[in-house]
Amino acid sequence: ITAATLAATNFNYTWQEFALGDPGSVLFDVWGTDENNVYGCGVIIMGDTVYGVMHWNGAEWKPVKRNGGLEAIFGFTNNDIWTVGGSIFHFDGLEWKEIMFYDQILVDNLPYYSVWGTNSNNVYFGSGRGKIIHWNGNRAQVVYSNPDQVFVKDLDGYASDFIIGVGTGMVPPLLAVKYDGVNWTELPISSNWSLNAVSIATRRHIYFGGDGVFEMKGNNFSRIQSFGYYIWDVEYNRQTGVTVASGAYDGIYVYNGLEWRDYRGQISSDHTRYSGIFTANNIIFCVGSTVNEAKIIIGKN
């Protein structure tokens, strides 16, 4: 399905929509090296086979890894990709190798909901048990532990000495912590809102997604936009300065630095929950699901 939309200040996107898998299929996250090499992860059911990773080669989506249950994906090159969920896998360009059983700490803190790093000898995993685990290429170490075991839903970093983790539990308070290269400390956020996503523009300018879109400039934290539905992911594009947020009920929202554009009902209208975003140059990838299938949209400006 292809549709054209025109937003303010020359935001002229053409959208492609892809439906994948049998009922029960879902994609949770998406990452790539460029617009012609993108990976989506989740659970893709195709007949009797379940896949965990789909690959976009610039022309079509193809399954590349069996076994689902994957929540997040992040990488560094074509031959160096990590994906986490009910286990931890690393792709070396030839095979997806299960890393989890290399270390008992990794096993003890299943499942995982987020992953970020600077290289494969410096990777952080966000656990559903309220912990952040560091992997140095050989061994795992618990570097942060939340006493309420709040899910660490997202991790993002600006550099090895500036990493932020956010999360949510069954009830507030939220999880929002920062690593400065030595210690993990709580961010100065006086709020009970739970957070699903974080994206760092600069060390002093950070976006968050949850019950709306939030912004931290310096130590000032505020909700800058509310769309009426939960935001599941937010992504700041450092190449273009564009911010994209996604959420429930076909929620795709684009901020060009001056104003937000709400694309609900213009791209899809089947109550898709968009849960993951990747941007490359002027192209937006969003993944999610309906009750019947996994969904992917690509927006080209």
Image (cartoon, rainbow, N blue to C red):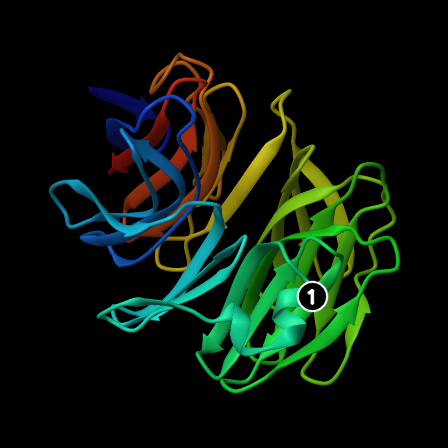
> Mark 1: few, some, or many residues within 10 Å (few <14, many ≥20)?
few
Residue beneath the point at 64% across and 75% down: 104
Judging depth in this view, the residue of 107 and 125 nearest the camera is 107
| Location of residue 31 with respect to 81 vertically, above or below | above
Q: Measured from the top left, where is residue 53 in percent x and y?
A: 33, 49
Q: Amino acid at mark 1?
A: Asp
Residue 239's quadrant in the figure? bottom left
| Location of residue 76 with respect to 278 vertically, above or below | below
Judging depth in this view, the residue of 113 and 164 nearest the camera is 113
User: Taking the image as drawn, is residue 204 in sight?
Assistant: no
Which residue is at the far front?
48
Residue beneath the point at 36% across and 18% down: 268
Q: What residue is disc 1 on?
A: 108
Which residue is at the far left?
59
Q: Measured from the top left, where is residue 258 in percent x and y?
A: 49, 39
Residue beneath the point at 69% across and 66% down: 108
